[in-house]
Image (cartoon, coloured by chain):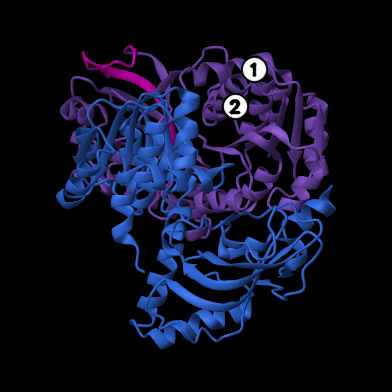
Chain colours: A purple, B blue
Amino acid sequence: MAGSTERALGVPRVLEPTGVLPQAAQRLDASPEIGPDEVRIAVERLNLDAASFRQLSEAHHGDGAAVRAAVLEIVRTRGKMQNPVTGSGGMLIGTVDAVGPESPLGLRVGDRVATLVSLTLTPLSLSDGLARWDGRSEQVPAEGTAILFARSIAAVLPADLPDAVSLAVLDVCGAPAATARVVERAGARSVVVLGAAGKSGCLSLAAARAAGATELTGLVRDEAEAAALRATGLADRVVVADATDPLAVAAAVGTPADVTVVCVDVPGAEHGAILATADGGTVVFFSMATSFPAAALGAEGMAADVTMLVGNGYTPGHAALALGLYRSAPGVRALIEPRIHP
Amino acid sequence: MAGSTERALGVPRVLEPTGVLPQAAQRLDASPEIGPDEVRIAVERLNLDAASFRQLSEAHHGDGAAVRAAVLEIVRTRGKMQNPVTGSGGMLIGTVDAVGPESPLGLRVGDRVATLVSLTLTPLSLSDGLARWDGRSEQVPAEGTAILFARSIAAVLPADLPDAVSLAVLDVCGAPAATARVVERAGARSVVVLGAAGKSGCLSLAAARAAGATELTGLVRDEAEAAALRATGLADRVVVADATDPLAVAAAVGTPADVTVVCVDVPGAEHGAILATADGGTVVFFSMATSFPAAALGAEGMAADVTMLVGNGYTPGHAALALGLYRSAPGVRALIEPRIHP
């Protein structure tokens, strides 16, 4: 069993250190020849993780050429785009140009796709020196090849939406899918979303509503966000508080909810989320800034009988669900569209 | 609502910075006068968190007097025992010597108790200069006072077990309780425990069995642990692998399980745990060394449809459940007893 598992996970692409999974690897083999269960993509655009781009930009004092050189050097030496400081990657879009006979992904040559696994584990080779990128945006026009394994995920880009919209929605599609599942399984009625005016937050509100929740509270950081969220009708109630101030969150939310979804992108939201959740309820952490010990010890320290979930970026059907919510919920569109840089 | 919530959580005891919860505080007011919903404990013994004690010991090159001085200085300046490097604390035992009229904890003056909330949020004042401690063990004989809030947890020490046994079991009582709950709710049959020969691991195996699981696999690190675990009969199958090597874990476990419980105390067990778990299954992370991003991105990167839980140290009834397992499962006793230093 280990043999096929290893191949499905891309282990044969790991050059250094041997024996680890591609994400933990220092260096991957990004050569374009594919194995029988792999897929090759002709890359069109990288979408760098926001934290990674910010780090690179600051380290090079906003010098676009230096940022571009840094990205090229990372990809050349590591065979993947994984920022060594932040550890994060991003995603990419491109066109399928070769499919191994044993690939289970259901892709066909010519499909335009977005990869839904991180760039941190995607073998990547660049051929254009990123000549069309000025190093000043997370969106990186690029030419080269990327490899998908048997256990990878890619979504075919829909024809009815601009690429930038699809990318923005797919980037966070794990959150609404997980929210919907938790609300359905728990039969939850009341849901609080921290960071409700952001991409993952507004999609999670829409997903919770579609899954049957009837009392939706959106917590946002300021009056500008509150006004924007109120205008959409996605939440039944909009409250303003600093998500990193547990007592302020508890006071703003009032009666604790069956389910709390954490979509804020800053550290320190764990305790407020726990206080916002009723005994027997569930907290879903979708922020990569979540601290495991802060959540675990916080709940224990407050004798809070809550179930806490590590937000898994993968749930079957997550891409279709998120794109469907974008199409069907005008409020989601209204909040996400202004965030998209064409 | 915020007023009583704040008091129940001990916020009035926070001196610096104001507005945070006691665990996040730099400095607590540890004065022995109690509020109407507080309980005061006459301290007998501190049980320092293993990671904290190791750090202090190494920092002071095993010089017991220096370690003792360091602990005294931390408690004096912070009003609690929270190691500034590891961020961790421990627990304590003592005798209840004052109960506020509004305390909901059900304790009575004279009860001998162990606190089940972390020392990192427990106001603590020491009066004996830790004169009876040589600075060479996690078990610290001590005199002084500690404060419990309304939303704290303490377990009355059972008369039929030595204090050291009760402390050892109560220290990890969240793991078996959470395991039992997950197995029951999911109707799980197969359970894998990583780090199965340790305290939380063997209790989790026993809890899974009691909750109805029928195929128990214990994963341990070497043949010595394997022999000890096999002799207890707590697991149906014992396998040996490095929990931080995902492919080795997958190969050792074979068919993935409905539920995987992570009880190893080292970083890097996330991906092995995910691979050990069947699609639709659940991973419960009980190691404080768990990395939130490694778990979240790992599952996404492997397209693993698993539910991942942050192990909550608090589940109602957890103390009684764990002590009951210790009494009723001879295998648990056989594994835990040799670890106890009298």
At horizontal 41% and vertical 65% (from top left) the residue drawn is B51
Q: Residues within 10 Å of mark 2 (few under 14, many from 20)?
A: many
Q: Are marks 2 and 1 in contact (CB under 8 Å)?
A: yes
Instruction: Tell me the magenta residue range.
Output: A88-108
Give the residue drawn at x 41%, y 32%.
B210
Q: Is residue B255 visible?
A: yes
**Residue that carries the numbered disc 2 in the rendered image:** A179
Q: Identify which residue, A87 or B101, lies in the foreground.
A: B101
Q: Pointer 1 indicates a residue of which chain? A: A
Give the image location of residue A79, x and y in percent.
27, 42
Q: Looking at the picture, how far across and down is residue B15, in whole percent?
A: 73, 72
Instruction: Say which residue appears at 75% left-offset and 46% top-offset.
Output: A249
Give the camera-side residue of A43 and B308. Answer: B308
Examine the image and state in which quarter residue A328 appears. top right
Image vertical order of residue A9 relative to residue B8, above or below: above
Mark 1: amino acid: Ala
Position of A222 with respect to A318 (left or right) is right
Image quadrant where one finds the N terminus of chain A: top left
Report if residue B184 lies within the magenta region: no
Mark sitting on residue A211: 1
What whole-number distance in Å separates the C-alpha atoms at marks 2 and 1?
9 Å
Relative placement, left or right, of A103 versus B309 is left
